[in-house]
């Protein structure tokens, strides 16, 4: 479903992503783990066709980012780390707007928005402007926004950043639900706990390169460490 | 529902919830104008009344001034005071002004009186005016006395009594006064109206982190830009309309009483108001897209404000033009962005504006607006612009600019896009207009050669080579077949007389300045063979190369891919025609545009610029030959009469044959090539 093939994104001599290849199948949750500046966000932006790869390619369901960026965007739900919401719109207005942009037919739009409002517990603040919402409330609206067109693939850039445990829990539950519905989910993070908790497979990114890939358990075995955090440190430490 | 419309509706909804925009758009015009104008009026009137309620304190100084004191004492508005040091007394404010009398000369001569006053003090100014009037009256009385003592008639010393009477109606005076400042105000208000929404919708979106989410939607970036730009332009138009309405209402409801005091009626005809409003639309589009394009390149609200402020200031200068006296509404000024619209507004308010500059002002504003919108669209959707923070990389300023220019021009080895060709034409046109025409006027033939080679040929070659474009494809450098040259010759031989007929028809609308043409004839007349050859080099060879490289080269190369051959040829002719129009030579438009269309069609069909160059050379060469030979010239000089109708049938036949032969030669060329390809 989601595939990177030797994707490189360079800025002058600096390679932010260097020959990244990986696959995420439908119904699979893949965590991209890496320290700050490892190239996680750049890789996800290339996949979302927001950045043009310097070489190599990425595709979603067979549509390549360079050849058919609009088709790629139709097939993905992208949650950016910045959690961008329009402060002067209410959650319902915001969801309707993105629904229209994603081509959700007017006849289905209201039903879809109502459903998302219910699923993510947005009812109580659905008429408040986004600018007045708490961080947790904003994140719930953001996730609902990424799902408004019910895409087969989800790309989540640090989805739990800045959230408390309760709000984080909403996101975890949502990822599990979407996996059960057969979606391919690629998310970036640097929190070991959520990787162990959610990911079927994990790829460790360091200085733009994929230095290890497998299940959490296999990475621990590979590095001879007793926890994922130690395994991660060992892998990243080897590189630096 | 199109995406642009979806974006527009959302942006409008969000913008109308922004207090800052609402303040600028609604509160300022609706409340501030009436309040500001009325309080300014009241304060001024109050000051005037206060000034007039108190008598001016004046001093009289000098020998034998008793009669003067006696006369001035008769005025209620004057209080007399003794002074010894006139300047000191005025400076210390103990008196408002002093009449300083010189020594009394012999009888019946002129006595000098100097009024000492303080030009930087309003009370003193008023006292000076009072004294001047009173002393003037006294002088008249003295003259009358002298005349009557000698038994002479009182009119002897004043053979003329001059009075003036203005034919301007009260509303014309009002229009004149409004025309001086209202255009500036309207332009500034449109500007302000678009300023904040543009920043908010572009840089603001980046700052709040919403742009990334927006761009992951499966919609073309252009649609998003159009939606945003429609919002900005609409807000600009609404702001300007509210300003215009509020100001006119303030004047017309009688709240503002200055007009009554001076018998001025600040009213505008409804038609003028409607035209002003309609013209504000392209102006708002221009500002909206320009600001949006710049704001999109900024990372934050603050950065966008910094980037837009110089543009804001740059716009004020042309907007100020209508305020200055003596600035005429000419075609050249009408084409200057912002200034053209400002002058058009002024003319609308003061009376009927001339048609041609008005059209030029509106059309060029639309063209500038289109270019600005293209700029905004190009800005959007480029990753350097979207993630301006550059993921931590640092590039030197010049390298960044070079990279941006490269990105704008597209990959090396391609042909230019319409926007590249348009920007090139705008730049070349501006240089030619402001540098080339003056060069030709000052240096004559040398100036013509310089302007053609330096301002047309060289930029075209530099644009293609430095821009990294495929020169052969862009400039249509393919060598022509000899039969194509023959067909082209027939084509131009037919097109020239038809151009003559077109010029004659156009003469009914735009009169031809025959005196000017006679001057041109003298310039073209050759006395000897070497002179004739030289004239052919200047007027036929040079334009056939330089103008072809620009018009059938870069312009055609950039626009041919965007539509049908006919559309590209028509656009080419239009631009070619406009390019040849200067202050006095509007009459050249149609024949030149016609020539441009024919040349462009021939070059598009044959993919060879040399075909166009040959036709251009023949066209201009024939004109030089005719002008050089007195016999031929006499036959061709119609002086406004219709060209000989006998010319029409052979011209049409020649053109049709030329077109057919050219098409056939290209087709046979293609089939030869494909057969050759198949046999290889």
Image: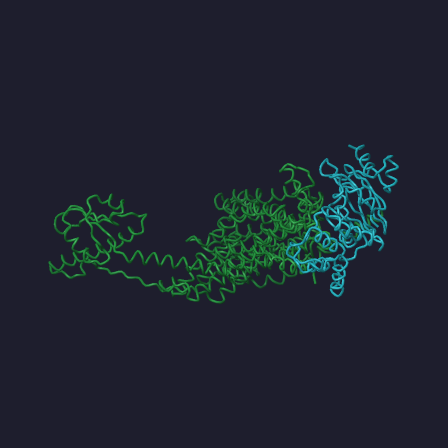
Most foreground residue, B641 or A126: A126
Question: How many numbered markers are drawn?
Answer: 0
- Residue B91 location, quadrant: top left
Q: Is residue B291 above or below residue B27?
A: above
Provide residue B42's location: percent of width, then percent of height.
38, 59
In the figure, is residue B4 to the left or right of A228?
A: left
Q: Is residue A83 above or below residue B76?
A: above
In the figure, is residue A229 to the left or right of B91?
A: right
Rendered cyan, the chain in question is A
Image quadrant in which the N terminus of chain B is located:
bottom right
Provide residue A230's location: percent of width, then percent of height.
82, 36
Provide residue B306's location: percent of width, then percent of height.
56, 45
In the figure, is residue B259 to the left or right of B601?
A: left
Outermost residue on the front side: it is: A166
Color encoding of the figure: by chain
Provide residue A52's location: percent of width, then percent of height.
74, 45
Whether residue B486 is visible: no
In the figure, is residue B497 to the left or right of B53?
A: right
Rendered green, the chain in question is B
Most foreground residue, B71 or B83: B83
Most foreground residue, A236 or A194: A194
Whether residue B146 is visible: yes
């Amino acid at each position: 479903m989601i595939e990177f093939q030797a994707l490189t994104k360079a800025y002058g001599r600096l390679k932010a992503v260097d020959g990244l290849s990986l696959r995420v199948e439908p119904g699979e949750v893949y965590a991209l783990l890496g320290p700050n500046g490892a190239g996680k966000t750049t890789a996800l932006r290339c996949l979302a066709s927001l950045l043009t790869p310097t070489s190599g390619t990425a595709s979603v369901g067979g549509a390549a980012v360079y050849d058919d960026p609009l088709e790629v965007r139709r097939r993905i739900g992208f949650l950016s780390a910045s959690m961008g919401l329009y402060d002067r719109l209410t959650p319902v207005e915001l969801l309707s707007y993105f629904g229209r942009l994603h081509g959700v037919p007017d006849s289905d739009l209201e039903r879809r928005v109502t459903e998302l409002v219910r699923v993510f517990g947005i009812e109580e603040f659905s008429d408040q402007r986004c600018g007045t919402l708490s961080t947790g409330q904003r994140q719930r609206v953001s996730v609902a926004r990424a799902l408004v067109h019910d895409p087969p693939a989800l790309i989540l850039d640090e989805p739990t950043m800045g959230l408390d445990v309760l709000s984080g829990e909403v996101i975890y539950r949502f990822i599990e639900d979407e996996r059960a519905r057969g979606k391919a989910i690629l998310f970036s993070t640097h929190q070991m706990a959520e990787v162990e908790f959610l990911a079927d497979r994990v790829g460790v990114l360091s200085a733009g390169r994929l230095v290890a890939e497998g299940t959490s358990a296999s990475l621990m075995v590979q590095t001879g460490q007793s926890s994922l955090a130690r395994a991660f440190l060992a892998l990243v430490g080897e590189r630096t | 529902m199109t995406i642009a419309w979806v974006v527009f509706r959302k942006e409008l909804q969000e913008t109308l919830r922004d207090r800052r925009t609402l303040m600028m758009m609604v509160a300022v015009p609706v409340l501030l104008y009436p309040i500001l104008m009325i309080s300014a009026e009241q304060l001024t009137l109050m000051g005037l009344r206060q000034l007039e309620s108190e008598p001016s304190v004046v001093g009289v100084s000098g020998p034998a001034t008793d009669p003067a004191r006696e006369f001035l004492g008769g005025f209620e508005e004057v209080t007399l005071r003794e002074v010894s040091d006139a300047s000191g007394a005025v400076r210390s404010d103990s008196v408002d002004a002093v009449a300083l009398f010189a020594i009394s000369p012999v009888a019946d001569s002129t006595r000098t009186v100097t009024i000492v006053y303080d030009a930087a003090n309003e009370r003193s100014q008023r006292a000076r005016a009072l004294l001047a009037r009173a002393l003037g009256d006294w002088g008249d009385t003295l003259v009358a006395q002298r005349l009557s003592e000698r038994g002479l008639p009182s009119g002897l010393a004043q053979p003329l009594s001059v009075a003036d009477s203005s034919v301007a109606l009260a509303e014309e005076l009002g229009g004149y006064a409004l025309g001086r400042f209202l255009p500036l105000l309207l332009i500034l208000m449109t500007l302000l109206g678009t300023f904040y929404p543009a920043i908010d919708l572009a840089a603001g979106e980046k700052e709040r982190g919403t742009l990334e989410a927006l761009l992951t939607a499966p919609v073309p970036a252009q649609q998003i830009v159009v939606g945003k730009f429609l919002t900005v332009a609409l807000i600009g138009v609404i702001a300007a309309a509210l300003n215009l309405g509020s100001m006119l209402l303030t004047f017309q409801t009688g709240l503002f009483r200055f007009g009554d005091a001076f018998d001025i009626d600040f009213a505008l005809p409804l038609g003028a108001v409607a035209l002003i409003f309609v013209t504000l639309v392209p102006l708002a589009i221009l500002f909206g897209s320009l600001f949006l394009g710049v704001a999109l390149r900024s990372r934050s609200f603050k950065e966008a404000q910094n980037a837009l402020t110089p543009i804001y200031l740059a716009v004020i200068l042309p907007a100020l033009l209508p305020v200055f006296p003596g600035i005429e509404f000419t075609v050249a000024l009408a084409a200057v962005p912002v200034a053209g619209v400002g002058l058009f507004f002024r003319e609308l308010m003061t009376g009927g504006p001339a048609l041609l500059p008005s059209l030029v002002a509106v059309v060029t504003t639309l063209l500038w607006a289109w270019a600005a919108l293209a700029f905004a669209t190009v800005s959007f959707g480029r990753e350097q612009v979207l993630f301006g923070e550059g993921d931590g990389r640092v590039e030197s300023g010049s390298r960044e600019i070079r990279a941006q220019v490269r990105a704008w021009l597209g990959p090396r080895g391609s042909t230019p896009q319409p926007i590249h060709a348009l920007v090139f034409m705008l730049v070349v046109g501006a240089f030619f207009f402001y540098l080339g025409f003056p060069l030709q006027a000052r240096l004559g033939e040398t100036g013509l050669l310089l302007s053609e080679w330096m301002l047309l040929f060289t930029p075209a070659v530099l644009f293609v080579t430095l821009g990294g474009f495929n020169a052969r494809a862009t400039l249509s450098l393919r060598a022509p077949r000899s039969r194509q040259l023959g067909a082209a010759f027939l084509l131009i031989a037919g097109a020239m007389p038809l151009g003559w007929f077109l010029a004659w028809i156009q003469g009914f609308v735009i009169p031809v300045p025959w005196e000017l043409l006679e001057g041109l004839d003298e310039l073209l007349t050759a006395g000897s063979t070497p002179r004739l050859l030289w004239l052919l080099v200047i007027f036929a060879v040079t334009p056939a190369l330089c103008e072809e490289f620009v018009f059938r080269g870069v312009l055609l190369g950039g626009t041919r891919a965007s539509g049908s051959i006919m559309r590209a040829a028509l656009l080419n002719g239009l631009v070619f025609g406009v390019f040849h129009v200067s202050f006095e030579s509007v009459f050249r438009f149609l024949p030149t545009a016609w020539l441009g269309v024919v040349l462009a069609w021939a070059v598009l069909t044959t993919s060879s610029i040399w075909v166009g160059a040959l036709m251009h050379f023949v066209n201009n060469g024939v004109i030089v030959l005719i002008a050089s030979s007195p016999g031929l010239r006499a036959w061709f000089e119609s002086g406004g009469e219709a060209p000989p109708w006998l010319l029409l049938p052979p011209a049409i036949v020649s053109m049709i044959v030329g077109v057919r032969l050219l098409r056939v030669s290209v087709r046979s060329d293609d089939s030869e090539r494909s057969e050759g390809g198949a046999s290889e």
